[in-house]
Image (cartoon, rainbow, N blue to C red):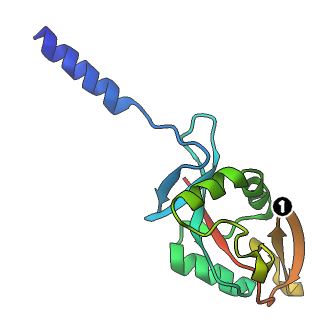
Amino acid sequence: MKKLLQTCLALLAISTTTFAYKIGDVITVGGKKGVVFEVSSDGQHGKVVSLYESEEGDWYSANKWCSEMYGRAWRLPTTDEWLVIYKRLYSINSTLACYGYTQIGENSEISGGEYWAFESDAENLVAWTVTDSKINRAYIYLAYPRARAIAVF
């Protein structure tokens, strides 16, 4: 009986142990995988950036790509989220390279490493892009920035 109780307590301890995520981990959110780029102090919550990126296209195409490729749980990163991604770019790109995915900024000969951000001023036909941690304003129909999607977990 004592051995059974010890076994049950050991199993209970294992089942209540929580896994802490860290920057660079690959996890699934909403059925799609991404690389963790931001994590809470307890390691249970944070944000992931997509493994894939879009081809060049305008801001509307970038938003459409996010929703069609990833679903409702995913969207374009804000400029602030892009700044966090660029701050942790080495860890993120190391993971992407390890799994054989395109690294952020890798296709820079075409798009200049420029990515669409979530924010826009559609009334004035401008949106924001981010290149190597620099925030830029761009014509909303500009056809060369790429897109990455993010999700919260």
Image quarter in which the N terminus is found: top left
Horizontally, is 143 left or right of 42 in the view? right
Image x and y of residue 143, in percent:
77, 90
Which residue does the image show at 68% across and 75% down from the upper left?
147
Check the image and report above or below for 20 versus 151.
above
Which residue does the image show at 69% across and 66% down from the upper left?
104
Which residue does the image show at 76% across and 61% down from the upper left?
82
Image x and y of residue 145, in percent:
76, 80
Image x and y of residue 151, in percent:
59, 61
Name the amino acid, label 1.
Ser
Which residue does the image show at 75% across and 53% down from the upper left?
84
Furthest toward the top, the residue is: 2
Check the image and report above or below for 117 versus 138.
above
Image x and y of residue 8, in percent:
21, 22
Horizontally, is 20 left or right of 127 in the view? left
Horizontally, is 90 left or right of 119 in the view? left
Q: Is mark 1 on a helix, strand or loop?
A: loop
Check the image and report above or below for 6 versus 88.
above
Q: Mark 1 points at which residue?
A: 133
Q: Observer-nearest residue: 144 or 15? A: 144
